[in-house]
Amino acid sequence: MSQTENRTTSARRSTRKETRRMPTATGKFLTVAEFCAEFQISRSTFYDWRAKGRAPRCRKLPNGDLRIDRADVERWLDSLEDANR
C-alpha cells in the first residue's frame, strides 16, 4: 500500500469514528462524556448514579453506547428541585 493510499484509508477511518461519536444532527442527545462534562462529574459517578436509579433516563444504542435526551435531563433536574422542597 502506498503512502497516499494509507493516508486516504486512515482519513476514512477517522471520519467514521467522528460520525459515530457525534450526537444527532439536532444536538438533542448527549453522550455520557458530554453529560459528565456539563455537570462536572466523573464517568464513575454517572454510572454509580445510574446503578442507583438517580441518573436521567438513558437510551442504549445498538452498538452499546448510551445517549441521554436533553429533555430527559431537564425533567431529571426538575425532579431534583421538587425533591428538595
Image (tube, rainbow, N blue to C red):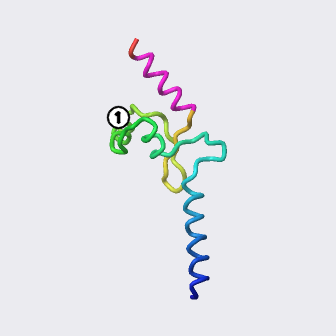
Residue 74 magenta-highlighted: yes
Residue 81 magenta-highlighted: yes
Q: How many marks?
A: 1
Horizontal side, residue 24 vs residue 58: left or right: right
Query: What residue is shown at x 62% (from left), y 47% (from top)?
Result: 24
Q: Which residues are magenta?
A: 71-83
> Residue tagged by mark 1?
52
**As shown in the figure, which amino acid type bears the numbered disc 1?**
Lys
Residue 8: image location, x then y, percent: 61, 76
Residue 12: image location, x then y, percent: 60, 70
Measured along the vertical axis of the image, is residue 12 above or below residue 46? below
Residue 83: image location, x then y, percent: 40, 17
Which secondary structure lies at badge 1?
loop
Query: What residue is shown at x 56% (from left), y 69% (from top)?
Result: 13
Measured along the vertical axis of the image, is residue 80 above or below residue 61? above
User: 54 or 40, which lies in front?
Assistant: 40
| Quarter the C terminus occupies | top left
